[in-house]
Amino acid sequence: MHAPTGDAATLPPQQTGNAVRPRPKPPAKDRPENTWWIWSMAGALFFGYSVLSLSLHERLLTRAFDLGIFVQAVRSYAEGHLPVSEVKGPDFPILGDHFSPVLALLAPLYWLWPSVKMLLVAQAALAAGSVLALTFWVRRTLGSAAAAVIGACYGLSWGIASGVTSDFHEWAFALPLLVLSLTALADGRLRAAAYWALPLVLVKEDLGLTVAVIGLVIAWRGGPGGRRPGLATAAFGVVAAGVAVLVLGSLHPGGFDGYFASHNPALPPGMLPPELADAPQDGLAGLLFKLTLGLVTPQVKVMTMILILAPTLFLALRSPLVLIAVPSVLWRLVSGYPDHWGTGFHYSLLVMPIVFVAFADALHRRGTSGTSLYRYLAGSAAVTLMLLPHFALWQLVEPETWRNHPRTAVAHSMMAEIPEGATVQASSYLVPHLADRTSVSLHGWGDSRPHPEWIMVDTRVAPALRFPLSALRESRAISDARAQGYRTVSERDGFLLLSRTG
């Protein structure tokens, strides 16, 4: 008997091997009308994400790279032209840096609220929306207790926390799309899984490969009825990734060489273990090195992979859905940029929805219930709570987050002296505050627009946070500016505001 085609061919969500277990009718307390707590949990997380990210911004802890770049891109869309960023360089085309046309969706919101803060709140909403989608699905699949624990553990996970508190990034758009695609795939709704995955190619150029893997899992897990939509989805992902790279190479000021050079730095020899320091970095030998020994060295890479899976008690590895994380993990492990290897910044944002959906799917595929289910849930909650104090969301309970900072007020009052539309160079942590109303670039960055009308620097930035100039080089740059005719407009609490005379 031939399998039917289309959605009728999708496998029931309770599939384990070739056996199909009917979905039980939920008890009254788990029925759709009793969902207020899911909305409340997602709302509380949205509030926490928003408050913390806005607090970091107000305390001058957001940066030119990347919040300054993204607000300039969104502002470009809102003004009716393709996105450019002065932070990257004079009139630098953002679509030659990363293929993220999804940012255009923020333009109408920017019309209503023309502020960099809108991006931070939108990111919080997208993250909270993914919590909402995941929790509703787990509730239907495993019940309310599992939904409450898995939804909360995902929402409080260190990867989400690091992402929503590291400026703004286009990957936030992928969170709800990934959850909706993967949960549809887990339910056997193959066409829905494909349709939710397709828009990922508009989020960033690398996500075409993620779409391709989703397609392959659809083809594998869906049986004969899944082969056609799965292979079509995989082909679409590969083609879309190729087209995105062609667009990037054609728009990047340095062409394809400039694009690949800016996103594929060489692995710093100082970051390698001594026994690997002499290993080749270039050509085929270098590639083989990165794909073998480079996957597990330095040790920080292994620790990051452990921390990604630990909140799921490594049970996510029992679900084929975890394979969808491979592209997001692999490029980080072979990267030559040390920040990609660790748990900081936003680099683990995309893997969190994948591993948590895989966790719930593994529990369901195993038929886990009763005491056994509660043990897994308790273990996941314990790991999440153990990690919580070591990552960004813990700042919500720290006094420093809520303390008044006099220097912040000084910085804002001095920035207010810069007129709208002026050309400015500023320290990294000041750039996002000026990007809404001026043409601002990064002071000391080699590609910044030369000879701006204004220069504003923070001379008291901690050495570890200085970018791109050291204190000595910044002092020399200020002396050079004064020699070129810039005069001091204001100097208070370590902030220096210069204006060009004449």
Image (cartoon, rainbow, N blue to C red):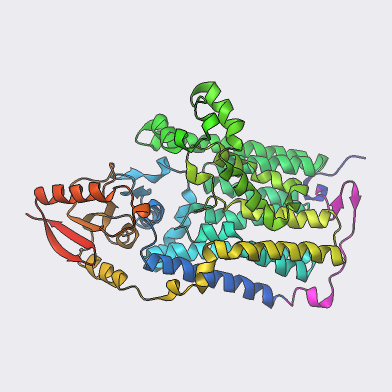
Residue 82 screen position, x and y as percent? 38, 48
Q: In the displayed orientation, state which residue is furthest to the left.
A: 502
Residue 76 screen position, x and y as percent? 36, 53
Can residue 80 be seen here? The reply is no
Q: In the displayed orientation, state which residue is furthest to the front.
A: 274
Task: Report the label total.
Answer: 0
- Magenta stretch, main secondary structure class: loop
Q: Nearer the viewer, residue 240 or 252?
A: 252
With 86 as the anchor, is 10 left or right in this view?
Answer: right
Q: Nearer the viewer, residue 153 or 383?
A: 383
Q: Is residue 15 magenta?
A: yes
Q: Which residues are magenta?
A: 10-34
Can residue 423 be seen here? The reply is yes
With 333 as the anchor, is 152 left or right in this view?
Answer: right
Q: Is residue 400 magenta?
A: no
Q: Nearer the viewer, residue 235 or 430?
A: 430
